[in-house]
Amino acid sequence: MGEMLAPSWLTKPTDINELTKGIWPATAKRESEGQLSIGGVSVGDLAGEYGTPLYVLDQTDFFERAKRIREAFSAASTRYGTTAKLYYAGKALLCSEIVRWVDELGLYLDVSSGGELAVALAGGISPARIGLHGNNKSHSEIGRAVAAGVGVIVIDSEIEVERIASAAGAQDRIQPVRLRVNTGVHAHTHEYLATAREDQKFGIAMADVPQVVANIRSHKHLQFLGLHSHIGSQIFAVEGFVEAAKRLVALHAELLKLGPVPELNLGGGFGVAYTELDKPMQIEEIAFAITETVEQECKKYGIELPALAFEPGRYVVGPAGITLYNVGTTKDVTVEETATRKYVSIDGGMSDNARPALYEADYSVTLASRESDAVPVISRVVGKHCESGDIVVRDAFLPEDISPNDLVAVAVTGAYCFSLASNYNYLARPAVVAVKNGLSTLLVRAETETDLLARDARLNSTATKVS
C-alpha cells in the first residue's frame, strides 16, 4: 500500500538493483557480487578506508564532462566566428586537487570569496585564469585579488568600482573588470536559485549600466572587459539563456559606441538530472542556441561578435559525485491509516547535504553494499539531526529488506554538498575522495571531533583568567 505515497513522477522499478542511466557517474556499476563500485573501487573498500559519510568523486566522469562542455561551446563559437572561455564555477566544489584538474583541462576558474581565491592560488593555477565574483567583496579580498594578478574581477555594485580602482591604483596595476547585469530574466528554477530577478541582491539594473560603465572607464587603473549575466542555477529550458543574451547584446551594442567591449559573459546554471523526472537538454544544443542568438543579435545591431565566456559548475562536477552513507536504523511508519513508508536513517544528513532543506531538492538513492531480490517499497532517507526536515531523499523505492549496516549511495552530490556542509549538531564534515582506474585518492580529509573541539576557546586557552 506504500505506492500511494509515491509522487506521480516516481516509477516503481522492475529491477531495484538497476542504476538509472544518466544519473550515476560514468564508471558506476554493480560488481559480480552485487556491490556498487565507482572508478573500479568498491563502496565497501571506500567505506572501510575512509569511513562514512563519504563524498566520492569519479575523476573520469569529471574530466569527460568538462571536456564535453568545453568542446560544445568551442564548436559553437567557432561556427559563428568567435571564441569561448569556460570558467569552472568553484563554488560547486573546490579543493586544491580540483584546481589542478581545472588547470590540466585548460579551463579558467571562477571564485566567489577570499577563501576560494586562496584555494585557487594554492592549487597552482595561473592567477590570470581566475575570475573573482561576489556581491560583497571586502577591501581585503579585492586588494589580495589585485595583488595576485587575477584575470578579472566582476563588479556587482557601483560601490565596488571605487574599491577596485583604489586597490589597483595603490598597487599601480591595471585591473580588468566585468560588470554583472541583472537582466530581469526569470529562469525556470527554484526561487532561491534564480539570480537575475529584479528584487534580489545580485547585479546592476540594466537602466543603470551605461552610467556605471562610464564611471569604470573614467578610472585609468580599470580595464572594462564587458558585461556579465547569471540568470540562475539548475535550469533545463534554454529560453531564459536566449532572452538574457538578446538583452545583453542590445546593451553591449550601446556601450560599444563609447569604447571597446571585447567580451560577453553569459554565466552558467545548466541543469543536470537528479532523478528520472529530470530531462535536461543536451549541452551541445544549449551551446549552439545561445551562440546563434548572440550572432543573430550582433548582426541586427551591425556589430562584431564579442569573445564569449561561460561558467559551468554543477554540470561538470554534480553527476560525477556520490555520497556513501551507513544505515543506522529503519522503521515502517503508517501514514493515513492505510499506507506505509519506510524511514531509513543514515549517519549523515542535512549537515553534508543541505540542498533538500534549502531548495526542496530531490535525489536518487540505491542500496550500494549488496543486491537485493526483496520487494521495492516506498522509502524516505533521513539524517540523524534534530530536525524533522532533515531529509536527504524524500521519495525513493528501496528494497524491503534494507537493514542496519547496509551502505546506501546518493547520486549527483558532487555539486554544492561539500561546499554547503556544516557542523550542525557537532557532526564532523566528511572526507572527499577521488576514484580512478581502481585507485582512490584522498582530496580532503574527514574532520574529527578533535578538530571541532580545537576551536573551543575555553578548552584551548593558555591565557590566565582575571577574576
Image (cartoon, rainbow, N blue to C red):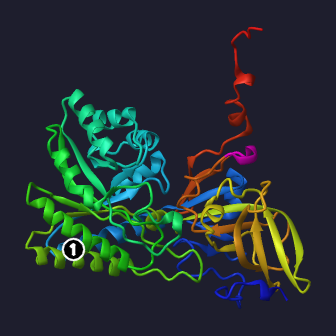
Up the image or down, 353 lies above or below 185; here it is above
Residue drawn at x 44%, y 44% as measured from the top left = 116
> Is 130 left or right of 417, judged from the image as shown?
left
Up the image or down, 297 lies above or below 309; here it is below
Quadrant in which the N terminus is drawn: bottom right
Q: Is residue 318 visible?
A: no
Closer to us: 198 or 330: 198
Q: Quadrant of residue 397?
A: bottom right
- Kind of residue at badge 1: Val
Quadrant in which the C terminus is drawn: top right
Give the residue pinned by disc 1. Answer: 294
Q: Is residue 139 visible?
A: yes
Helix, strand or loop under label 1: helix
Residue 299 x/y as whole percent:
11, 77
Residue 378 x/y as whole percent:
78, 81
Residue drawn at x 24%, y 67% as measured from the top left = 248
Label 1 neighbour load within 10 Å: few <14, some 14-19, many 20+: many
Up the image or down, 330 lies above or below 429; here it is below
Magenta residues, as a range? 423-428
Residue 375 x/y as whole percent:
82, 86
Closer to us: 239 or 2: 239
